[in-house]
Amino acid sequence: MLSSLVSLQSLVLDSNNIESVNGPLALPHLKHLSMENNKLHLIPASFFTSLQSLQFLSFSSNFLTKIPINLPKSLLSLKMERNRLKVVSFRDMRHLENLSHLYLSENSLSSIDGAQLLANLTTLELSQNQLQTLPLRLPARLQKLDISNNLIQKVTAQDFQDLRDLKHLFLDNNIVSLFEAGALQRCSQLSNLALEQNLLLSIPLRLPATLARLDLKGNAIQDIAERELKDLKQLQVLNLRNNKISALDLKALEVLPRLRHLYLDGNPWNCTCSLLRAREVLKAKGTDVRGGQCAAPAERQGESWMSSKKIMRQCEHHLHLTEKSKETKKKPKPEEHSSIRINVDDDYYDYEID
């Protein structure tokens, strides 16, 4: 039925009840083939014989237990999500020298080895499988690795020693409790690191200085230390929701000159007046802060230390005395109206509340 369509370039057969296919499919100019959401169990090797121009192929949401063999060398993108894959044989794919995107999420994979044979792979998605360890010997040109929603327990430098082009790493929703200091130091272009919903007790040390976004929601972090964040001069988004943090280290905030978004809700904040100093540091930076409800002391429970005027009034005298003592060596500059004065000297910020 299709053999007469010799000029066809795109064929979409999604969401039918196709149970089997026969080959070869004689469409020499076909570039895009999608058969998502069908009932395919097996793809015969002869199916691709005449598809030597194919670049984009999707068999997502079928019942396939292995990746088809004899895939066209021209392939750029292969989508195999939501199948029944238990093993991936990269040896059968090593001829795919042009393949740059491989999607294997939502299968039953327990291990991945040999992916380095796909030398030009830039995107690898492995979310929602059963991986207990990070894949060994990943392709050196990889830019995006999504291994979220697995059973990864630890991250070591050996796992990422050759991934100098990696920009996006998703490790959220695993059971990572060990994150080796400097494990990602060789990832010299990493900008996005997702570590939400793991078992981390602290922010990993010596993260790449290139990070722009760091997501740590839903761990068991109790403290934020300057040494954990001091190298992150490019960090713009920091997500600390749903941890066990009760206080903020001012020095840790001051070493983040580009911080624009900070998420703090779901932490048991101890709302002493020292937190108000952190509030003014964040406001003066122009940081958008979400959350910050007090868990203690009892009289401030439920209040937000970022916006509560009641807490501000209660701490005003304390803050005023603190600022006056710091300004004894400076000539005061009275203001006509209440405001925050900002003196900027490189990465150092000084604030006054009048």
Image (cartoon, helix red, strand yellow):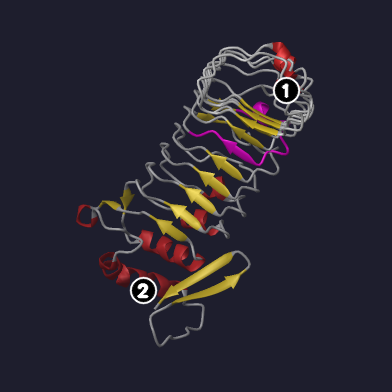
In the rendered structure, find residue 320 and report the number of the disc placed on it: 2
Secondary structure, mark 1, is loop
Verify CB contact (< 8 Å) between mark 1 and mark 2: no
Secondary structure, mark 2, is helix
Quarter of the image with the N terminus in it: top right
Question: Percent from the top left, x then y, of residue 125?
Answer: 60, 30
In this orientation, which residue lies closer to the viewer: 133 or 336? 133
Which residue carries the number 1 mark? Answer: 3
Residue at image location 38% in from the left, 80% down from the top: 338
Taking 63 as reference, is 262 above or below it? below
Q: Is residue 77 visible?
A: no
Seen from this angle, which residue lies furthest bottom? 336
Q: Is residue 265 left or right of residue 42?
A: left
Residue at image location 41% in from the left, 62% down from the top: 279
Q: Quadrant of residue 273?
A: bottom left
Question: Percent from the top left, x then y, of residue 263?
Answer: 43, 51
Taking 126 as reference, is 164 above or below it? below
Quarter of the image with the C terminus in it: bottom left
Q: Is residue 345 left or right of residue 99?
A: left
Query: Disc 1 versus disc 2: distance between alpha carbons?
Result: 83 Å
Seen from this angle, which residue lies furthest left? 299
Q: Is residue 247 left or right of residue 238?
A: left
Taking 33 as reference, is 111 above or below it? above
In terms of sequence position, does the residue under pointer 1 or pointer 2 come before the other? Answer: 1
Extent of the magenta region? 156-172
Q: Amino acid at mark 1?
A: Ser
